């Protein structure tokens, strides 16, 4: 099912997998997320209504570059040493500590956005040097959550 999501005047098309599966798989701009909705609460979604095709054909645009596994960070620096928030939301749980060694795919923290929980996982193996968020913090898209030491 495809739904349209608007966050701070920015629109996203989200493709949602089977709502009975746990976790629910959601694809936002080509990036896959695992979502754990609260049990017992209804999940409401609005189907996407495609706009009619324009009468004049738009000028061709170059193909977009492939998306990185982790969204880019707006503050520069070596992005391979950072974990960033893929979407705006609230940090529910931080599962690691500074100085802890992590493996690729290990859950680092849980982010809640629009009453849906998403596990933020390590994009590589390494040691967590700095944790920049705590449970309850509101974060914006591409905000740095953690830095790797190496």
Image (cartoon, rainbow, N blue to C red):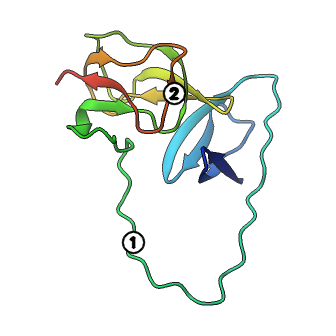
Q: In this view, does 7 lie to the left or right of 143?
A: right
**Residue at 75%, 36% in the rendered image:** 20
Residue 119: which numbered mark, if any? 2
Vertical position of residue 106 compared to residue 76: above or below: above
Residue 34 point in image, percent of width and height: 56, 35
Q: Is residue 128 left or right of residue 92?
A: left
Vertical position of residue 82 compared to residue 2: above or below: above
**Residue at 36%, 59% in the rendered image:** 66
Residue 30 point in image, percent of width and height: 49, 53
Categorize mark 1 by other alpha carbons within 10 Å: few (<14), some (14-19), many (20+).
Answer: few
Categorize mark 2 by other alpha carbons within 10 Å: few (<14), some (14-19), many (20+).
Answer: many
**Residue at 44%, 22% in the rendered image:** 107
Q: Residue furthest left?
A: 150
Which residue in the structure is indicated by mark 1? 63
Q: Which comes before the other along the chain, label 2 or label 1?
A: 1
Badge 2 marks a residue whose secondary structure is strand
Q: Is residue 20 left or right of residue 7?
A: right
The image quarter in which residue 136 lies: top right
The image quarter in which residue 105 lies: top left
Residue 33 point in image, percent of width and height: 53, 39
**Residue at 51%, 13% in the rendered image:** 135
Badge 1 marks a residue whose secondary structure is loop
| Cα–Cα gap, marks 2 and 1 | 30 Å
Q: In which quarter of the image is the C terminus?
A: top left
């Amino acid at each position: 099912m495809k739904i349209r999501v608007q966050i701070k005047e920015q629109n996203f098309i989200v493709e949602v997998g089977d709502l009975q599966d746990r976790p629910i798989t959601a694809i936002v701009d080509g990036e896959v997320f695992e979502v754990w909705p609260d049990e017992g609460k209804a999940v409401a979604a609005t189907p996407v209504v495609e706009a009619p095709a324009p009468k004049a054909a738009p000028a061709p645009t170059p193909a977009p570059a492939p998306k990185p596994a982790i969204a880019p960070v707006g503050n520069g620096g070596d992005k391979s040493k950072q974990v960033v928030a893929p979407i705006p939301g609230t940090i529910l749980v931080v599962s690691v500590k500074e100085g802890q060694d992590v493996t690729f795919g290990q859950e680092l923290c849980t982010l809640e956005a629009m009453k849906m929980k998403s596990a933020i996982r390590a994009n590589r193996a390494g040691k967590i040097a700095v944790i920049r968020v705590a449970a309850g913090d509101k974060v914006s898209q591409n905000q740095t959550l953690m830095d790797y030491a190496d």
